Amino acid sequence: MPRQILCTVAALALAASAGACSSSRFDTAALSAPVRPAPRIARPLPPEEPDLGPGLSSGPVTSAPLAPPPGAAGAPVVANPSGPIMAEPAPPPPVQQQAAIAPPPAPPVVSTGGRSAVVGGWTAKDATGASCKVNLASTPALDLYKASSAGCANKDLAKVTAWDFRDGEVYLYQPGGTVAARLRPAGGAMDGALSKSGAPLAMVR
């Protein structure tokens, strides 16, 4: 083998031996060096959820909708220049009126005026057309009232001395309680008949 080749081989062997030694020293130093733990990186913790008590959701808290301002339910809002805004009150609901059934009208009451309405002077006319004066006084006479006649051609009327008012009728009496005539007042006059003959008799003011 030539000398130059031998020198080259020897140089390579020395280089390999030196490299092995240095690698061994590096490994020994690396093993003998204390192992340091890797630094921890702090991570942010998730936000804690508040304890809302039993029955409440732990989800995201949302605000409740605000109540509508006065007048937002349909009532018109009237601006008051001298004060706060006021809501005009809604009109009251219409009242359902029931049709009232009117009672039938009562029959008219015909008033004869009573005993006091016939007190005074009357002109009596019989069926013959003869007339005379009959006065019905308010002076009591026993259980009747005093009466008198003047200028009567009819004998029954000429004997009238008392009168009474019963059941809406005027009774003319002769002495002894005999009924001379019966008349019913009507519109400022009296119409009736003589008791004995049944002849019509009328008396007017």
Image (cartoon, rainbow, N blue to C red):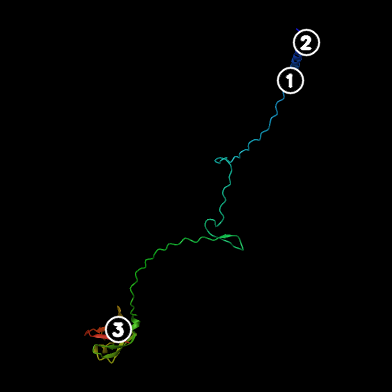
108 or 72: nearer the viewer: 72
Amino acid type, label 3: Met
Mark number for residue 190? Answer: 3
The answer to whether residue 132 of the structure is visible from this angle is: yes
* Residues at circles 1 and 3 in contact by the CB criterion of under 8 Å: no
The C terminus: image quadrant:
bottom left
- Quote the CA–CA distance across marks 1 and 2: 39 Å
Which of marks 3 and 1 precedes in the sequence? Answer: 1
User: Depth check: 47 or 103 in front?
Assistant: 47
| Residue under pointer 2 | 4
In the image, which is nearer the foreground, mark 1 or mark 2? 2
Provide the residue designation for mark 1. 30
Q: Please give the name of the residue rendered at 30% of the width and 84% of the height, measured from the top-left corner.
A: 190
- Residue 119 horizontal/vertical position (percent): 34, 84
Q: Which amino acid does label 1 sit on?
A: Ala
Distance from label 3 to label 2 (Cα)?
A: 190 Å
Q: Is mark 3 on a helix, strand or loop?
A: strand
Q: Is residue 197 above or below residue 15?
A: below
When asked about the image quadrant of residue 80, the answer is bottom right
Q: Residue at x 33, y 81 (%)?
A: 115
Location of residue 137 by image quarter: bottom left
Residue at position x 73%, y 20% in the image: 30
